[in-house]
Amino acid sequence: MADYQYFSSSWLVRVIVFGLFTLSITTLALVPLLKNLSHPRILRMPVWLRWALLVPVAFTVSTVAEIIPKFLFSLYEVSINHTLTFRPGIDSLIWSAYAPLFFVIAGAKVAPSRRLTVYLVLGVFKIIVAVTNIYTVLSVTSAGMSWSRTDTLINSPLWWNFSVYIIGICLIIVSAIVTMMETKTPEEDI
């Protein structure tokens, strides 16, 4: 993989179009999974067990929210019989914006009470992670590294990663505002 990915409108359009397409299909698959977190069997579980399962369930749903779109995108990639140059952009979008949103939603769904509070706590946790990543990108670029340099972990350019971290923060904030508007009391279901 190249060490640099300069800004290209065609690369960006492909990432956005294929990302939205893949993530839309994935969301349709994940909604029933999230609804199962409110299944009567789960609601009858002891309160202490639901609290104990909160973070493991959130991580599990977040992982599924990473696996499904990567699998769908891989199917597309295999069908055209070559590696797509914009795959790192999709991976960054899934990993830094999409999966964290499902982490927060799933954790709040499995909480036995105070779901809005849990939603906000998990959301703040994911926002802190994103802000830390933003700080890292700003630190290395202010030290002289190019914005076009690719991240060593996911091979997407720093300018794209920075943008995706901002998108992820905005998604969590907007979903929290929507959740707060729909929830009258902290104990009420999300």
Image (spheres, rainbow, N blue to C red):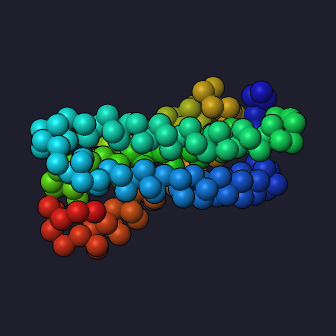
Q: Is residue 103 left or right of residue 108?
A: right
Q: Tell me where residue 185 sits by quadrant.
A: bottom left
Question: What is the residue that sits farthest to the right in this orientation?
Answer: 81
Seen in the image, is 117 located left or right of residue 7? left
Residue 51 seen in the figure: no
**Residue name at image x 27 percent, y 68 percent:** 180
Residue 101, given in percent of the width and then of the height, sits at 43, 51
Instruction: Give the residue at x 44% y 45%.
Output: 100
Q: Quadrant of the N terminus?
A: top right
Is residue 113 among the parts visible in the rendering? yes
Give left or right: position of 129 versus 80. left
Residue in front for this viewpoint, 159 or 16: 16
At x 29%, y 37%, the residue is 55
Expressed as whole percent of the image width and height from the top left, the position of residue 146 reads 68, 36
Q: Residue at x 32, y 43 (%)?
A: 125
Q: Is residue 179 above or below residue 21?
A: below
